[in-house]
Image (cartoon, rainbow, N blue to C red):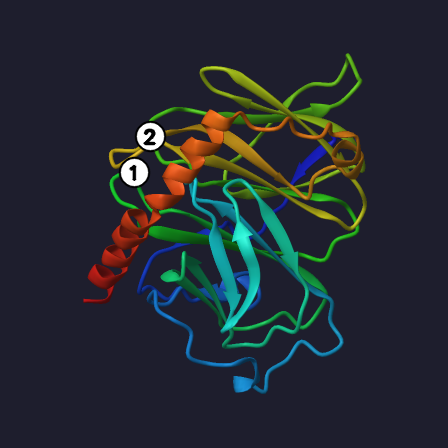
Amino acid sequence: MAPVRSLCIAPFIALTAGVSVQPSSALGSWWNFFSHGRAHHATSGKGSSFLRNDGYDLKLRVCNAFPSDMPFEVYHNEDEIKKELEYKSCFEYKEDLRAGDRMNFKVQGLATGSFTIDDLPTQDATLVLVVARHDSTSMAVSFRSHVFANLASPQIALIDTYQGKTKGTVEVKEAGSEDSTAQTLEFNSVAAVNEGSYKVMLKGAETQEYSLDTSSEEAYILIRCGVESELGTSWKQELIVFPKNKATEASAPEPEPEPEQKKEEKAGAREAVPSLAGVLLLVVACMQN
């Protein structure tokens, strides 16, 4: 049996400010549960909706694919759930979610984007929300979303948020097998795989390798990120892998202390944050007009 099997499910939908996307009736009503509203502060509390996910195991995985030195602050409605979501990092949120809830993103207290949960699955599911850069010419944010089907076999979703002309392909092959043939994954699609260990390769100007150990009933996210920016710093294409291998995390060496010069550079970057946040706020204001 081939280690990778494509699934005929709905693709990811890139949502932009002020646009509400309704799922196609042919895809069913639960493939895309999110729509992106205009960027603003959340006004509703957790008790604003009577629609709940009683009895179902819902996991929301939030990833930051927005290239920047400045982390996002993430709020569930008005409650802060992640103080610093750094670039190329993800976290899992399993608290009570309701239809109408908003996931709000801020940079140093300034609102940069808001994402509304329109509906919720009526079965166990893993939901994915990725905040990314809208384009290479501005600092505006956009979102990618997906809901994984509840399958017994492992699944891999490959999301492309890279902004730029650099080409890239992602291949996966079974690790430790000389006879294994690499298979190409399509961007913005989902594939079912066998349980086991894999080598994931991002091929472009150079080849970057990542390890992935899959287990049954788990859903994995691969995100191509980076930007060839026409405004500010450019960031090379890379992959975000989540969840990461527990064995790899446990055996990872402690990071070396940063040189004083590096610390001073970071401190200088943080002092410059108001200008970045101001740009984001200006973009949001333009979108609302």
Please report whichever mark, 2 or 1, sits nearer to the chain's N-terminal start: 1
Find residue 210 and report its image quarter: top right
For image coordinates 52% across by 85% down, the residue present is 48
Q: Nearer the viewer, residue 28 or 96?
A: 96
Q: Would you name the residue on which mark 2 appears? A: 228
**Image location (x, y in percent) of residue 156:** 65, 41
Q: Are marks 2 and 1 in contact (CB under 8 Å)?
A: yes
Q: Would you name the residue on which mark 1 appears? A: 136
The answer to whether residue 224 is left or right of residue 91 is: left
Q: SS for tag 1?
A: loop
The answer to whether residue 26 is left or right of residue 150 is: left
For image coordinates 48% across by 32% down, the residue present is 263
Number of residue marks = 2
**Image location (x, y in percent) of residue 162:** 41, 36
On screen, 94 above or below 229? Answer: below
For image coordinates 43% across by 54% down, the residue present is 143
Q: Which residue type does callout 2 highlight?
A: Glu
